[in-house]
Amino acid sequence: MGCAALPPKQGLLFIFDDLRERFFWMHDTMIPLAILYIGDDGRIVSIKEGKPGSDATIPSGHPVRYALEVNLKEGLAVPVGATVKISFD
């Protein structure tokens, strides 16, 4: 929120304690983003477009453990079903 740009190949990862449907919104967000909703197994279950400044909720449509916000163009280039490797090394 409040960022005028997001560098390529960077994003914001949200990690949740439980597995359930999630809802995001774009209030005070200045750039178009893709939200990659990721299941417990690391597979992308849905990719949604976030429109700058919108207060509309953006549902994952499935239970998820993670959400990754990236630049819209980069996010839409990733196929649903792809596996994401998350490492905390």
Image: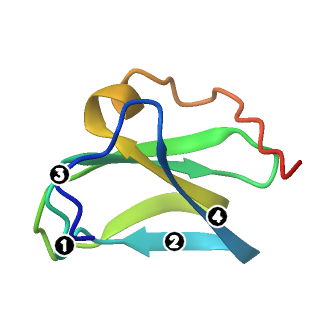
Q: Is residue 87 left or right of residue 50?
A: right
80 relative position to 5: left or right: right
Sequence-wise, the earlier of marks 4 and 2 is 2
Q: Going from the N terminus, do you reach mark 1 or mark 2 first?
A: 2
Examine the image and state in which quarter residue 57 appears.
bottom left
Height in image: 84 above or below 20?
above
Amino acid carrying label 1: it is Ala
Label 2, label 3: how many angstroms apart (C-alpha)? Answer: 21 Å
Whether the residues at callouts 4 and 2 have beta carbons within 8 Å, the answer is: no
Per the image, the residue denoted by label 3 is 31
Q: Residues within 10 Å of mark 3 (few under 14, many from 20)?
A: some
Q: Earlier in the sequence, mark 2 or mark 3?
A: 2
In whole angstroms, how far apart are the C-alphas of marks 1 and 3?
Answer: 15 Å
Dot 3 falls on a residue whose secondary structure is loop
Which residue has dot 1 on it?
56
Which label is found at residue 22?
2
Amino acid type of the residue that numbered disc 2 sits on in the rendered structure: Arg
Closer to viewer: mark 4 or mark 1: 1
| Quarter of the rendering occupied by the N terminus | bottom left
The numbered mark, 1 or 3, whose residue comes first in the sequence reads: 3
